[in-house]
C-alpha cells in the first residue's frame, strides 16, 4: 500500500491529528512523495490528498496546519474541500485555496479561515474534510506535522 500510494508512514496517518506536542520534534510528521497529478480541477492534490472524517458533523470555521522539520519541504499551495458524508464520496464543497507560509517560528500553527457561505449559499455542517496539497517549498518530498479542524456542531458560529 505504501509503495502504491507513494507514501512512507513512519507514524500512523492519524498522528498529524494529535494535539501539537511531540510534533515539535518532527517525530510524528507524515512524509509524502509527489503523486504527479497536475489537474487543477481534480479533487486530488498534485502531491497528496488527505481526508479526515470528523467525529461529529460540524460547521467548520478554521483549518490549522503546521510543519516543523527541516528534513523535507513544507507544503505550499493547497485546497480544502468539505463533505457532508463521512466517506467523502458525496458532492464536495470547495472551501478555499490557501498557501502555507514558511517562517522562522514553526511552533505556532497557521490558521486558515473557512467561509460561512459560498456564492450566497450557507455552508452546511461537514462530516469530512479533504486537504489537497498541490505544491511544496522546493523538495521531492513534502511533510505535514499537524492538521487541525475547528468548528461548532451547532450554527452558533
Image: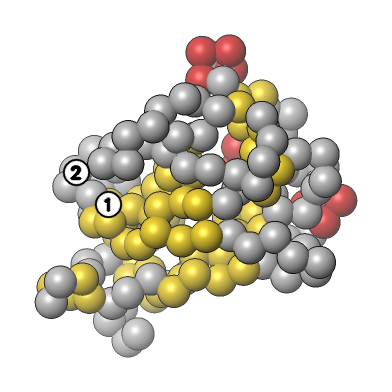
Tell me, yes or no, if residue 152 can be seen here.
yes
Determine whether label 2 and label 1 are within 8 Å by CB: yes
State the residue at coordinates (37%, 36%).
Answer: 44
Tell me, yes or no, if residue 31 can be seen here.
no
State the residue at coordinates (67%, 41%).
Answer: 138
Q: Nearer the viewer, residue 95 or 36?
A: 36
Q: Nearer the viewer, residue 17 or 29?
A: 29
Q: Nearer the viewer, residue 49 or 138?
A: 138
Q: Position of residue 54 (x, y in %)?
A: 41, 54
Residue, disc 1 = 83
Farthest residue, direction left: 120
Q: Is residue 44 left or right of residue 8?
A: left
Q: Position of residue 9 (x, y in %)?
A: 67, 27
How far apart marks 2 and 1 lie (CA) works out to: 6 Å
Query: Image quadrant for the C terminus?
Result: bottom left
Callout 2: SS: loop
Disc sitting over residue 90 in the figure: 2
Q: Position of residue 117 (x, y in %)?
A: 22, 75
Amino acid at each position: 500500500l505504501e509503495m502504491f500510494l507513494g507514501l512512507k508512514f513512519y507514524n500512523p496517518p492519524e498522528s498529524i491529528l494529535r494535539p501539537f506536542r511531540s510534533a515539535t520534534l518532527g517525530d510524528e510528521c507524515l512524509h509524502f512523495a509527489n503523486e504527479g497529478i497536475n489537474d487543477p480541477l481534480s479533487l486530488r492534490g498534485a502531491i497528496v490528498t488527505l481526508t479526515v472524517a470528523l467525529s461529529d458533523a460540524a460547521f467548520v470555521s478554521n483549518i490549522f496546519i503546521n510543519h516543523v522539520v527541516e528534513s523535507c519541504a513544507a507544503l505550499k499551495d493547497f485546497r480544502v474541500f468539505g463533505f457532508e458524508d463521512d466517506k467523502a464520496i458525496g458532492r464536495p464543497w470547495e472551501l478555499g485555496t490557501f498557501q502555507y507560509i514558511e517562517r522562522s517560528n514553526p511552533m505556532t500553527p497557521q490558521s486558515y479561515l473557512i467561509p460561512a457561505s459560498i456564492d450566497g449559499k450557507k455552508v452546511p455542517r461537514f462530516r469530512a474534510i479533504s486537504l489537497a496539497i498541490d505544491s511544496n517549498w522546493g523538495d521531492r518530498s513534502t511533510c505535514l506535522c499537524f492538521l487541525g479542524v475547528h468548528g461548532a456542531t451547532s450554527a452558533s458560529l
